[in-house]
Image (cartoon, rainbow, N blue to C red):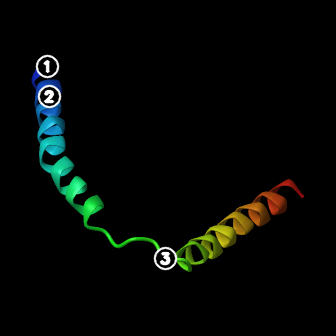
């Protein structure tokens, strides 16, 4: 059981070593947000929240 924990810890450390530089690169080279981008995010978000409220309302009825 100890070898499983050790190998999992090594795997997680290697995962961080390889993914963090790539994530930093993606964040620095990503396109900047423009004026209409927030509306494109809010509309599906409002739809999901509305759907969840509908489901809760149907269950509590």
Judging depth in this view, the residue of 39 and 10 nearest the camera is: 39
Q: Earlier in the sequence, mark 3 or mark 1?
A: 1
Which residue is identified by label 3? 34
Q: Answer few, some or many: residues within 10 Å of disc 1's Cα (few below 14, many 20 plus, some between 14 and 19).
A: few
SS type, badge 3: loop
The residue shown at (16%, 51%) is 21
The residue shown at (71%, 62%) is 52
Residue 6, image x, y percentages: 12, 25
Residue 8, image x, y percentages: 17, 33
Residue 7 lies, with reference to residue 48, above or below; the image says above
Residue 39, image x, y percentages: 61, 76
Query: Which corner quadrant holds the C terminus?
Result: bottom right
Q: Answer few, some or many: residues within 10 Å of disc 2's Cα (few below 14, many 20 plus, some between 14 and 19).
A: few
Which residue is identified by label 2? 4
Label 3 to label 1: alpha-carbon separation: 50 Å
Q: How many marks?
A: 3
The picture quadrant where one finds residue 31 is bottom left
Q: Earlier in the sequence, mark 2 or mark 3?
A: 2
Q: Residue furthest right?
A: 61
Q: Answer few, some or many: residues within 10 Å of disc 3's Cα (few below 14, many 20 plus, some between 14 and 19).
A: few
Which residue is identified by label 1? 2
The residue shown at (75%, 63%) is 55
The picture quadrant where one finds residue 13 is top left
Label 2 to label 3: alpha-carbon separation: 47 Å
Q: Is residue 54 left or right of residue 49?
A: right
SS type, badge 1: helix
Residue 21 lies, with reference to residue 1, above or below; the image says below
Q: Nearer the viewer, mark 3 or mark 1?
A: 3
Q: Nearer the viewer, mark 2 or mark 3?
A: 3
């Amino acid at each position: 059981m100890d070898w499983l924990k050790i190998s999992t810890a090594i795997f997680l450390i290697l995962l961080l070593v390889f993914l963090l530089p790539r994530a930093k690169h993606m964040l620095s080279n990503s396109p900047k947000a423009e004026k209409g981008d927030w509306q494109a995010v809010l509309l599906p978000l409002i739809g999901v929240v509305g759907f969840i409220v509908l489901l809760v309302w149907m269950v509590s009825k």
